[in-house]
Image (cartoon, rainbow, N blue to C red):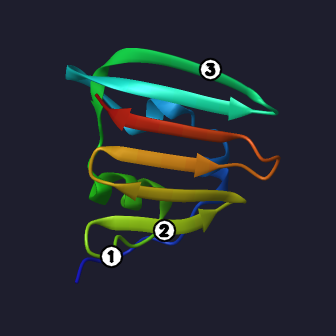
Amino acid sequence: MPCIKPPQPESVKDMKEESFIREGKGKLKITIESEGETLETTMSGSLKSVEEVAEMLGVEANEGKIEATVDGVKVIMQRGKLEMEFENGDRMRIEKV
C-alpha cells in the first residue's frame, strides 16, 4: 500500500480547476453551477489520474475512486469525471468529452 501524505490545507486552498487538468490531447467539458446559473465550456486537455489527484489532495483512492471532503470541498472522482461541491453550494464538474 502506498504511503499517503497528510492533507495540507494551505496547498489545497489555492487550487484551481487547472490543477486537475493535464495539457495535451483530448477535450474536457467544464460545468459550473452557481445559484441557479450554469456555465459550460470546453477545453483541450485531459484529467489527471485518480491516483495523482488523490496524492495532491492528501486522500486515498479506493477502487479507482475518490469520495472525500477536503478543506470544506466535497470531491468525488472516478476515471474521466471529477465533481466538486463547495461550502457555498456551488458545484463544478470536469468530464471527458
Question: Earlier along the polypeptide chain: callout 3 or callout 1?
Answer: 3
Secondary element under disc 3, as helix, strand or loop, is strand
Which residue is nearer to you in this view: 21 or 94?
A: 94
Amino acid type of the residue tagged 2 in the rendering: Glu
Find residue 2 and report its horizontal and vertical position in percent: 25, 77
Rendered residue at 43%/54% (across/down): 56
Answer above or below: position of 24 versus 35: above
Residue at left offset 59%, top offset 60% = 8
Quadrant housing the C terminus: top left
Looking at the image, do the residues carrying marks 1 and 2 touch, with CB atoms under 8 Å apart?
A: yes
Which residue is under mark 3? Answer: 39
Which x, y percent locates residue 16?
57, 33
Q: Which quadrant is the N terminus positioned in?
A: bottom left
Name which residue lies at 27% across and 52% down: 79
Real-space CA distance between mark 3 and mark 1, rounded to the nearest whole angstrom: 30 Å
Q: Which residue position is annotated with label 2?
A: 67
Element type where label 2 sits in the image: strand
The residue positioned 62% from the left and 20% from the top of the image is: 39
Relative side of 11 to 5, left or right: right
Secondary structure type for disc 1: loop
